[in-house]
Image (cartoon, helix red, strand yellow):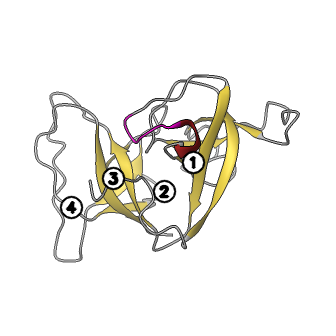
Amino acid sequence: MKGNRIILTPDRGCRVEGIIDSAEKPGTILQYDPGQAVDGGGRFHWVVFDRGADGDHPAGPYVVLCEDFLQGKTVTDAYVAATRAVGFVPWAGCELNLLFKNVSGTADDVVPDAVGGSLLIVDDGTGKVIVTTGTVEEEPFMALEALTDPTADTLLWCVRCG
């Protein structure tokens, strides 16, 4: 993790508000839920990333769940399901801290290589990033720091590949 925020380069994306449909922590990747109506305030509902029938592409843009300063929340505070949430749609080159999934019993080390980082994919159904499996259609993020033998989900410094 770099710094103490989810979004490190706020000029490379746009902030959005929505209604989160499950209790999630900042750094989780969400997508719009087209099956739900917009709420009375004009906010869309968000669900955890799910590949579904669209390959690796979410319904709409990737939305990174952010900490909510207006409610005194930090990067470690989970949202309550069915509440207003703050998100960020990152553009290529945006640096951010994403929630890296600890996959127990596996070699889930992140080792940046000579190119500058390890390519990451979004884990289906959890919205957390994992090291690429090499069988995906899209690797939207790259790790910018090393991580060895994580024992829990942790925030990881990344960049949006585009």
Q: Earlier in the sequence, mark 3 or mark 2?
A: 3
Tag 4 residue? 145
Residue drawn 40% across the image and 51% down it: 121
Q: Are marks 1 and 2 in contact (CB under 8 Å)?
A: yes
Crowd class of label 4 (few under 14; some 14 to 19; many from 20; radius 10 Å): some
Of the two numbered discs 1 and 4 on the same chain, state the one appearing first in sequence. Answer: 1
| Residue at the spot of label 3 | 4
Please report contact status of discs 3 and 2: CB closer than 8 Å, yes or no: no
Residue 125 in picture, x, y percent from top left: 49, 31
Majority secondary structure of magenta residues: loop
109 sits left or right of 125 in the view: left
Q: How far apart are labels 1 and 3 at the CA level?
A: 33 Å
Q: Mark 1 or 3 closer to N-term?
A: 3
Identified by mark 1, the residue type is Gly
Q: Which residues are magenta?
A: 72-76
Q: Which mark is residue 137?
A: 2
Left or right for 123, reference 13: left
Sort mark 3 into few (<14), some (14-19) or many (20+) by Cα contacts within 10 Å: few
> CA separation, marks 4 and 2?
23 Å
Packing grade of label 1 (10 A; few <14, some 14-19, many >=20) is few
Measure how far apart labels 4 and 3 are at the Cα level: 15 Å
Q: Please report contact status of discs 1 and 3: CB closer than 8 Å, yes or no.
A: no
The residue indicated by pointer 1 is 55
What's the amino acid at mark 2? Glu
The earlier-in-sequence mark between 4 and 3 is 3
Write the residue at 28% across / 35% down.
Answer: 153
Q: Nearer the viewer, mark 3 or mark 2?
A: 3
Q: Quadrant of residue 18?
A: top right
